[in-house]
Amino acid sequence: MNPLLDVLLVLATLIYSYLEAFVKLFVPVKRKSVSGELVLITGAGHGVGRATAFEFAKRHSRLVLWDINKVKKEIGDVSILVNNAGVITAADLLSTQDHQVERMFEVNILAHIWTTRAFLPAMMNNNYGHIVTVASAAGHFVTSFMVAYCSSKFAAVGFHKALTEELSTLGKDGIKTTCLCPVFINTGFVKNPSTRLGKILEVEEVVEALMEGILTNQKMVFVPSVQRVALLLEKLFPERALAVLKKMTDVKFDAVTGQRSAQ
Amino acid sequence: MNPLLDVLLVLATLIYSYLEAFVKLFVPVKRKSVSGELVLITGAGHGVGRATAFEFAKRHSRLVLWDINKVKKEIGDVSILVNNAGVITAADLLSTQDHQVERMFEVNILAHIWTTRAFLPAMMNNNYGHIVTVASAAGHFVTSFMVAYCSSKFAAVGFHKALTEELSTLGKDGIKTTCLCPVFINTGFVKNPSTRLGKILEVEEVVEALMEGILTNQKMVFVPSVQRVALLLEKLFPERALAVLKKMTDVKFDAVTGQRSAQ
């Protein structure tokens, strides 16, 4: 192909995509049913994982719930809520180690890669499934004093993107992917967080956005969605202007206390 | 502060930054001297690390060279080239493990975080130093069949960005950071790579760009630099147009053979 044809093809695709997006504004969004679907949730013992388990339970999915710690009694109740739920505690999923950096990567991304790797072959055979990667705004925007955390969340975003690309290359269009990127959530992971731009998120609103994202097959769920604009500005603005903007958002917290102590 | 003042401040910073960038086009770039400086290079036994060691040797830096494998005889010659070079082999820096994903993360990012953590306190005390993170184009753009690699390179980019941000917050402006992001390099890591956009890089041109980036304190070194435009387009264009563009670049390779077998 010659370069002129390439440019024309890109332009035609651009026009088609924008027209399609415009038309879609007036078409009601379809939400898929997850009733009877098998749903595995890691980190189901607390925070977003726990609340998500309840949402799938309400929609009559069959649940498999994992957590490093034992999944607590309240989550056990989910299995009462739906008869066909199985509750598995995987206390040994992650070995305990002293090294904090390794642990951060294990909790945030290595365990997720291993889990995905374990279940992907069956999904590929059936060309059916949905893989949700829980990342963070910290997977796109960095914050001081969270270097290892940011790094591991960048890894989670990279994993989601690369997996999505590979599934597309392999023509496995029946396997959907969603990546969740919320800003600070009020789960006790960070102590006394505050920012001038918008409030700290509650678990409920994050899970609401996540469920909408899953049921409508969105690839990237930003909570709040204004992060998309910030990502664009980051590429457009010079460094100094970004530093001024960053100072204005005034992200602050007292300490990273970790999920463990928050339970 | 009120929002109107905020907007004015951002606008003023934007105009100032663009004017400054324009003026700088006509000012010769300053390159710092690295003569006599202590330079630690991990992965110094092959590819980019090895070529970079030679560049610093030419500029009379004191070298400390690390690699998982023993640093080979040719690199030993560097210590002959400059009298004050010390050559340390760190065969035990990384434990050998079967698990490929862990190993990918160890080689690409965990070892780098540990090394940085070990040397950062001394740099902080002196407010002096330069930390180079070797990432990849794969830390910004994903490619099929390299999921764990992309994920670990995203982590490397996130580490560099978060570290840079933290040093800035702490006022340690004497510690510089550089992140290297080349596309495929002809080192044997990937077998028979090819792409329609531009040729596969030779080690020499990557190291030339890296040295220029270090000596002029550039934060992000893209090789080739057109990646910056691609990053912007990625945020601006709809998914379908990006898919067409990606297909045009036609990135192909036969297999990921790994650095080990390439030596």
Image (cartoon, coloured by chain):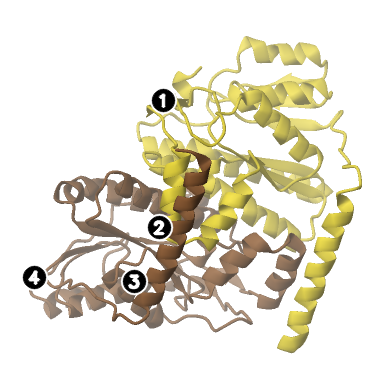
Chain colours: A yellow, B brown
Marks 2 and 1: CB-CB under 8 Å?
no
Q: Which residue is mark 3?
A: B213
Question: Can marks 4 and 1 be said to lie on one chain?
Answer: no
Identified at 21% across, 58% down, the residue is: B129
Q: Which residue is mark 2?
A: A240
Graded by Cα atoms within 10 Å as few (under 14), some (14 to 19) or many (20 or more), the crowding at tag 4 reads some
What amino acid is at disc 3?
Answer: Gly
Q: Nearer the viewer, mark 4 or mark 3?
A: 3
Q: CA distance from mark 2 to mark 1?
A: 31 Å
To which chain does the residue with label 3 belong?
B
| x and y percentages locating residue B165 in the rendered image | 37, 49
| Disc 3 secondary structure class | helix
Q: Nearer the viewer, mark 4 or mark 1?
A: 1
User: Viewer-proximal residue, B2 or B122?
Assistant: B2
Quick one: label 4 or label 3, which is nearer the N terminus? 4
Query: Image height check: is B21 above or below A106?
Result: below
Q: Which residue is mark 4?
A: B84
Figure quadrant of residue B206: bottom left
Question: Can marks 2 and 4 be said to lie on one chain?
Answer: no
Q: Which residue is mark 1?
A: A257
Image-based side of B195 in relation to A130, left or right = left
Q: Quadrant of the C terminus of chain B?
A: bottom left
Marks 3 and 1: CB-CB under 8 Å?
no
Q: Nearer the viewer, mark 2 or mark 4?
A: 2
Query: Image height check: is A54 above or below B227?
Result: above
| Disc 2 secondary structure class | helix
Question: Can marks 2 and 1 be said to lie on one chain?
Answer: yes
Query: Image height check: is A223 above or below B127?
Result: above
To which chain does the residue with label 1 belong?
A
Q: CA distance from mark 3 to mark 1?
A: 37 Å
